Image: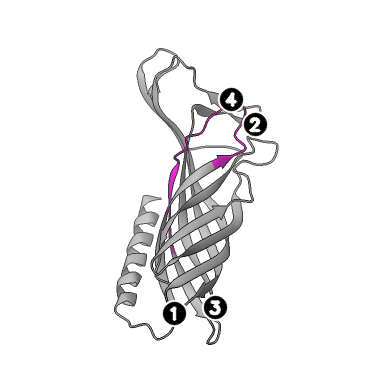
Amino acid sequence: MKKLLLFLISFFALNAVLLAQKPSESLFSDKFATGIDVFNDVIMDAPEGIKFRAINPGVNIYGMHTFPVKESDFAFAIGLGLGMHNLFSDATLQDTSGVSFFQAIPDDLDYKKSKLSLTYLDVPAEIRFKTEGGFKVALGIKVGLLINAHTKYKGNDPADGSKTKIKVSQLPNLQTWRFGPSFQIGYKWINLTAFYSLSKIFEENAGPEIYPVSVGISLRPF
């Protein structure tokens, strides 16, 4: 997983350097470009009695190829990326009889963090609009394949109160695929970005019906 992430970052960085050396010939040119999103996940439909943090930071790293629509102000783009999400809560993820659920951490148990981390291999596609002044808007859809998932707990052990770190990687009942609409609006390289997941994190009737809404800042050259 770390090798894949390092490869993608290096590949996208090299492309960004090469593209920066080429002068732009039009509002949109037929080219490959890279971008990065830094966002916060708002968790929807949290189970009763379970609280997720207001700040759940995540990162998207991606590369997309732009296809201009003739000589108009519009273009189509499609690409590949990694979406990394960290969902912090006051609970631990448990599984009983084939059903996953969040179990609240006792109030008298001292802990530093408890989170669910998800990484997706994404295919984003967009319709883009841009003006000569640098204002731009993009409306698209993103489909992702879950390639890594784990939980991390750092705090006191409920059994004996000792300090402990627990990482669990074999998590059942997670949806393999995700999809949803995306939106970008901004000026030149800086944009506001949003993604609304239409798919739940867990499979139907096998876990909490939670899903994230991601809002953040995007740095991209289109």
Q: In the rendered structure, which disc, 1 or 4, sits on the residue that comes first in sequence?
A: 4
Q: Is residue 10 left or right of residue 198?
A: left
Asked if the residues shown at circle 1 and circle 4 are in contact, with their CB atoms under 8 angstroms apart, the answer is no
Q: Within 10 angstroms of label 2, few (less than 14), some, or many (20 or more) residues? A: some
Marks 2/3: CA–CA distance: 46 Å
- Give the mark nearest the N terminus, 2 or 3: 3
Q: Is residue 168 visible?
A: no
Percent coordinates x, y for residue 49 in the rendering:
58, 25
What whole-number distance in Å separates the C-alpha atoms at marks 4 and 2?
18 Å
Within-10-Å neighbours for mark 4: few <14, some 14–19, many 20+: few
The earlier-in-sequence mark between 4 and 3 is 4
Give the residue pinned by disc 2.
99
User: Which label sits on residue 132?
Assistant: 1
Q: Which mark is residue 192?
A: none
Seen from this angle, which residue lies furthest front?
Answer: 133
3D distance between C-alphas at marks 1 and 3: 12 Å
In the image, 13: left or right of 115? left
Measured in 3D between alpha carbons, the distance from the residue under mark 1 to the one under mark 4, in whole angstroms, is 51 Å
Look at the image and give the residue range highlighted in magenta. 43-62
Q: Which mark is residue 74?
A: 3
Q: Amino acid at mark 2?
A: Val
To which residue does mark 4 refer? Answer: 49
x, y (%) of residue 27? 45, 81
Q: Residue at x 65, y 31 (%)?
A: 98
Callout in the foreground (2, 3): 3
Tell me, yes or no, whether the highlighted magenta stretch contains residue 44.
yes
User: What is the three-letter code of the residue carrying label 1?
Assistant: Glu
Position of 194 relative to 171 (above/below)? below
SS state under label 1? loop
Q: Are marks 4 and 3 in contact (CB under 8 Å)?
A: no
